[in-house]
Amino acid sequence: MEKLYPDSEVELTPFVARHYDALLNLVTAGFYRGFIRKAIASMKIEKKDRILDLGCGTGRNACLMYRYLDGGSVTGVDVSDIMGDQYRKKCAKAPGATFVKQRIDIPFDLGEKFDKVFISFVLHGFPQEVREIIVRNAFDHLKEGGSFHILDYNEFDLDKAPAYVRIIFKKIECKYAFDYIKRDWKKILRETGFSRFEEHRLAGRYARLLTAFKEPRNKNQETS
Ligand SMILES: C[S@@+](CC[C@H](N)C(=O)[O-])C[C@H]1O[C@@H](n2cnc3c(N)ncnc32)[C@H](O)[C@@H]1O
């Protein structure tokens, strides 16, 4: 499939998509396993939650989130058929985990609202105007009182980071990621309508789970 954004690294080659989990474990020397478990544990998932996972990949994260559910659901959305096949296989024993093939970089409507929207290492890989569409898609798919969980790079000054961070970042990241880490994400999310935030720093200060809350409308009106 032709890339929608030729400079993006989150649109994976078929080889990388097919072996995504194994490659991630390999390049992080197994570190990613604990990292993703810790991030998902910080989401405060409740048993009946309905969760939307944007750019869900192989279903690994969906399966981890599913463990917290009892009567809830996870809907994974991804543009890639290769990821869709892996998701369905991985989540075969999780009847509440479903896959929808859908581009997230354009406005879309799944026809239902969710308690939580999750996006993991996807947002940084797009131009800013596309990220804003994705954030809007997340907001529009959330119930009032719901939360948006962005697991991605933290904001940081690459020039002040240790040499090993600079070298790895420059080696693995596309041009959009360099812009992503410089942006004020709480300000961007506030402009979309989110009004309260929590953050959990991960991997030192270079990654984080940023949670943005869509407050019930009357509560927002009272504070504005
Ligand atoms: C770096 S991977 C991250 C996968 C997963 N979120 C994770 O943390 O393991 C990026 C994912 O975004 C998906 N993706 C890229 N562009 C997309 C688009 N325009 N619409 C939907 N999914 C997209 C890719 O197919 C891939 O599965």
Image (spheres, rainbow, N blue to C red):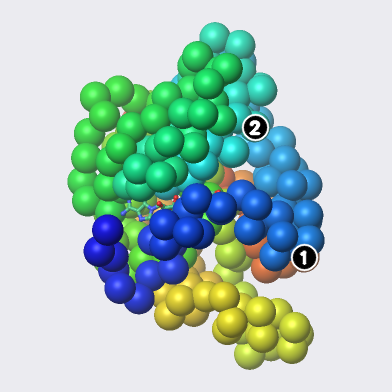
Q: Residues within 10 Å of mark 2 (few under 14, many from 20)?
A: some
Q: Residue at the spot x=44%, y=43% of the render?
A: 83
Q: Residues within 10 Å of mark 1 (few under 14, many from 20)?
A: few
Q: Is residue 138 left or right of residue 17?
A: left
Where is residue 211? Give x, y as percent.
56, 45
Quick check: 4 above or below 113? below
Which of the pair 182/64 is nearer the observer?
A: 64
Q: Residue at the spot x=58%, y=84% of the render?
A: 170
Quick check: 117 above or below 104? above
Quadrant of the frame with the N terminus: bottom left
Q: Is residue 198 left or right of residue 182?
A: right
Q: Residue at the spot x=39%, y=30% of the render?
A: 99
Residue type highlighted by circle 2: Leu
As measured in the structure, the alpha-carbon distance from the residue carrying label 2 to the one carrying label 1 is 22 Å
The answer to whether residue 121 of the structure is visible from this angle is: yes
Which of the pair 131/218 is nearer the observer?
A: 131
Where is residue 45? Give x, y as percent.
62, 27
Identify residue for label 2.
64
